[in-house]
Image (spheres, rainbow, N blue to C red):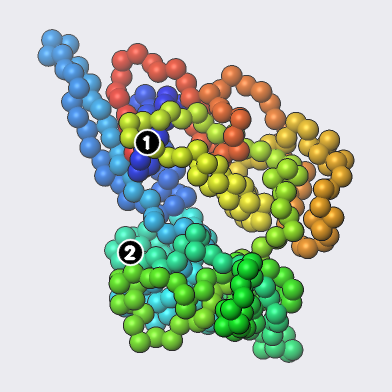
Amino acid sequence: KCINIKEQPDGLDFYYPTKSLGQHMVNFLESVIPQRTKFSKKLITQDDRSNTYRYKYTWCVEIAHVCKDDVVVLNKRMCSSMGGISPLLLCYKVSSVVMLIDPCTMQRVAVSAKAFWRDPPAVACTRSQLREFVVVDIEQPNDPKDKVTAGKFQQGEATVMRDDEGTVNAEEERHLISMTHLAHQLKPGDTCAGYDLKSSNMGDDVLSRIKGRDLPEVILVRKTYPRRKNRHRQRKFRLKTLKKEEGEGANRKKDASNDDMEIFMNDLEEDPEMRADINLYKRKNVQDRKRQPVEDEDEDEDDGFPDVALEELIDDMESNLNIDSKHNGSSSKMATGAPAPRGGDDVKLQF
C-alpha cells in the first residue's frame, strides 16, 4: 500500500513501506509508459549487536516527454532504422510504446522504450498550440480498393479554414489543404483541432531535423465538438483519486490542475481504448441528470459525440480507503493509502 503522495515542482513522490511494493510500482510504470529508472539505497540505521540494518530505497523514474496529440521530429538515425519514414510524425497513442503516424503516407511506427531513450524525439508542437479549424471538404477515392487505411484510420485530402473568432484578415481566412488520417471521422461542416505549422514557432533542434523538407500547411489531430459546451454538467461518470499533499516548492496553480483534469476527462469520453483500463464510477445523480432538459438546443443535435454507455460504469461503493472522491482524477486502479507499519525499510519513488 502507498502510505503517502507528495506533489513536487517536477513530479510526484510516492512513499511505500517495503521495497517490494516500490518495485511493484516501478514494474507497473514500465508496462504502461516508456520510462527509465535510476535506483539508489542509503543506510539509515544499523545495529551491530543484532546485525540488523535499515535502508532507504529510492527509484527515480523519468517518464517519456512525448504526449498524445504531440507532433514530434525524429533524427536521421531513427528514421533510417524505421524504414526511411518521414521525420515529422503525430503521436496518437502512448502506452508501453509510443505510437506515431505520418498523415501524408499513413505509415505507422511503434517506438519502444529502448529506442526512445537512445534517440529521444524532439517535440515540435504540443496540445497548447492546437487551433480550431472548420472542415470545408473531404476528398477520398470512390473505389474502396484505392482507399488508404492504417488500422482504424483512413486517409483523405482535407480542405479546412481557420475558425478563430474575430479574424478579419482575408489572408488568414484562406483555405488550407492537407492530407489527414481522420477521413473516417470528418465530414464537411465539422470542427476539428490541428496544428498550423506555417505559423508555429519551433526550436532550433526541431528546425535542424526538418531542414530542406516540405512541410504540410496543417496537421489535423482530432474531431472536436464545440456545441457540447456544457459536457461536464451532463457527464455520467466520475473518477476517484488518491489524496496528495503539497511538497516543498510545489506551486502548481489549482486552476491549471483543474484544466488538465477536464482535458483528461474529455479524452476519456472520446477514446474508448483509453478508458478500457480505467474504472469509471456512476455519479450519484446520473439518472436525474439524464432527465434534465438540455440548456442549449444545439447540444441536443446528433453530432457523433462518443457518449459513455451506462454499461461501462461501476456502481459507486463508499469505503474507508484514503481516496479523494471530490475531484475527477486519474485511474482508481492505483494503490490506495494504508497506515505505515513500524520498522522495515523506507521506500521513496519519484517520477
Q: Is residue 103 above or below residue 282?
A: below
Image quadrant assignment for residue 221: bottom right
Q: Is residue 337 above or below residue 180?
A: above
Q: Residue at x 19, y 29 (%)?
A: 42
- Residue bearing the label numbered 1: 250
Residue 296, x across and y down, in percent:
81, 52
What separation in Å lies between label 1 and label 2 (alpha carbons)? 27 Å
Q: Residue at x 37, y 36 (%)?
A: 250
Q: Dot 2, crowdedness within 10 Å: few (<14), some or many (≥20)?
A: some
Kind of residue at disc 1: Ala
Q: Is residue 5 above or below residue 213?
A: above
Q: From the viewer's perspective, is 5 left or right of 296? A: left
Image quadrant assignment for residue 325: top right
* 56, 47: nearer the viewer: 56
Q: Which mark is residue 57?
A: none
Tell me the mark number nearer the camera, choosing from 1 and 2: 1
Q: Which mark is residue 120?
A: 2
Residue 101, x across and y down, in percent:
51, 72
Q: Residue at x 70, y 60 (%)?
A: 226
Q: Dot 1, crowdedness within 10 Å: few (<14), some or many (≥20)?
A: some
Q: Is residue 156 visible?
A: no
Q: Secondary structure at mark 2?
A: loop
Residue 3, x across and y down, in percent:
42, 24
